[in-house]
Amino acid sequence: GAAQVHHYVYFENSSSNPYLIRRIEELNKTANGNVEAKVVCFYRRRDISNSLIMLADKHAKEVEEESETTIEVDLTDKQKHQLKHRELFLSRQYESLPATHIRGKCSVALLNETESVLSYLEKEDTFFYSLVYDPSLKTLLADKGEIRVGPRYQADVPDMLAEGELDDREQAKLEVKVWDPDSPLTDRQIDQFLVVARAVGTFARALDCSSSVRQPSLHMSAAAASRDITLFHAMDTLHKHNYDLSSAISVLVPLGGPVLCRDEMEEWSASEASLFEEALEKYGKDFNDIRQDFLPWKSLTSIIEYYYMWKTTDRYVQQKRLKAAEAESKLKQVYIPTYNKPNPNQISSNSGKPAAVNGAMGASYQAQASLIGRACESCYTPQSHQWYSWGPPNMQCRLCASCWIYWKKYGGLKMPTQTDEDKLSSSQPAEESHVRTHMSRQATQGTPVRNTGSPKSAVKTRQAFFLHTTCWTKLARQVCKNTLRLRQAARRPFVPINCAAIKAEYADRHCEVAGNPLKIKSTRKPLSCIIGYLEIHPAVKPNVIRSTPSLQSPSAKRLLAPSNHSSLSILGKRNYTHHNGLDGMKTIFCCFSD
């Protein structure tokens, strides 16, 4: 098919991650002949923080409670799980992507509260949004362009009062009648009065210095005086004077001079008009942002009035023609070819490349043999014409062909897992809410999480794991060092260990130990026995040679015996006994005994 401007499309930026959902704003051809698309970004639930997800769920719950026309539908756990995959968040962020990365078209609509949520699940490639996400500020806001449908947006019409019944409403808050179509004046008399009002307005502009600068010619002054603000003032004057022409004309020209009525188009300066056009080009009809960033000294009412008056000017017509001519020169659509290149995540069923095995007795081992027989992580089916590896490599998870397409389009798994927030909320206490939200974040992203029952293990990173070794494993490390070779195995953590070779060597070592039992080390004798032995066998006093220093002899040697440097170690090139003070204690003992 062909993708056109304002179409919603899938973009692929990674072979293993879900598609990006974007709306095409422009199609531009680059210098080298490639086509780039300027797009508006949409974000999934897995792309925003967990705190914002909770805020979005709270907003959806409040809207559902306020709405009186929401169709009550009992959704299953699977439908609730899949409905989260259809929710998007609009952003004001633009980016340029190559058109060759388009993988198909989809549909995104503003959430309609009057429709059933099941309508989004029944249609393929259909998404909805209700909130606007700001990626720079990390905030969520309600979309200002929502369609106000339903009884809460309609006027509340009271019943008609009976004859003689008093109106207890507060009259100051009610509408005021400003014109009576059943007045005694004819249409010709009203038109004549409006001509007089225009003439007074033209004369007033000739007397006003600021107006004469803006409208230097008589034609410009007459055109400004013919605007709606002058006619509204004239009709309001007639109504206030009970449609008495003589009284109304006298009010048009009071003692101070003729009345001058100017609207927003006349009040704004040329620089303010330029700022408004620049802001309109950037933000569109988002008048709140226009006022905040470009015209903070203007009121919102003034900006909106100026916009609708500006649309009646020749300036607006010229800009509209320029944009139309510019749009004609740009690309209208781009052809989306069928993408048939193999995905790197495809699992090959006939891979003949053997994998290495830790151990002396290793044989040929298929790299993907561990995945054979594993069911799909999403729908749990054991059979599929094509399998795709999914998740971290050490998890060794896979998806079937249909679940892989669902993962790429909707960014999640078809079936809810044990780590969903709904199930965790009923099984875990309230104080572990931070653990629950973290796990639901991983589950929303579609990352496999192995729950070991410990909350600490759940909040670790995706690649982290806890290895609990048994006593037999610890014994095998000591007994089977030659076969196990732990250093080589640590350098290749994902290569399996040859357990058969380990068991064989342990059996041989066990037989040797059974034939030659280990010698039991004797226990230490009590202190009284050691003192008695030292009394019977006194220590021999060593002969220490003392030399007298002289002028001819070299410098006096140390009285302490030199330490033994026969076996040097890493610790400052000294042996263990020197660092523990054993040699020094022996020498000091000899000196004291001398």
Image: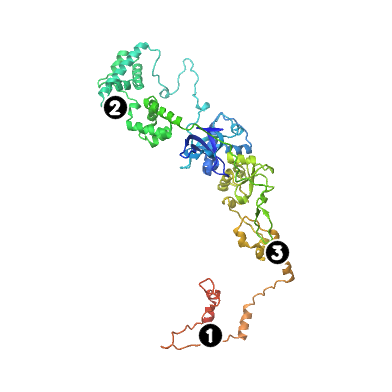
Q: Where is residue 579 in the image (x, y as percent from the top left)?
A: 53, 74
**Which numbered mark, 3 or 2, is in the foreground of this view?**
3
Tell me how far mark 3 sits from mark 2, CA to CA: 102 Å
Q: Where is residue 72 in the image (x, y as percent from the top left)?
A: 60, 31
Q: Where is residue 486 in the image (x, y as percent from the top left)?
A: 62, 62
**Which numbered mark, 3 or 1, is in the foreground of this view?**
3
Residue at 72%, 71% in the rendered image? 517
Check whether the beta carbons of the residues at disc 3 and disc 2 lie within 8 A of each other. no
Q: Looking at the image, which is closer to me, 339 or 307?
A: 339
Q: Can residue 45 be seen in this view?
A: yes
Kindly indicate the quadrant of the structure image that contains residue 309.
top left
Secondary element type, mark 1: helix
Check whether the beta carbons of the residues at disc 1 and disc 2 lie within 8 A of each other. no
The first of marks 1 and 2 along the sequence is 2
Identify residue for label 3. Answer: 505
Compared to residue 129, the image places residue 308 above or below, namely above
Colour scheme of the picture: rainbow
For the residue carrying disc 3, how many other residues have a C-alpha within 10 Å: few (<14), some (14-19), or many (20+)?
Answer: some
Q: Residue furthest front?
A: 32
Q: Where is residue 550 in the image (x, y as percent from the top left)?
A: 42, 88
Secondary element type, mark 3: helix
Kindly indicate the quadrant of the structure image that contains residue 273.
top left
Identify residue for label 2. Answer: 214
Q: In which quarter of the image is the N terminus?
A: top right
The kind of residue tagged 3 is Glu
Q: Is residue 453 visible?
A: no
Compared to residue 232, the image places residue 452 above or below, namely below
The kind of residue tagged 2 is Arg
The first of marks 3 and 2 along the sequence is 2
Kindly indicate the quadrant of the structure image that contains residue 180.
top left
> Which numbered marker is on residue 148?
none
The first of marks 3 and 1 along the sequence is 3
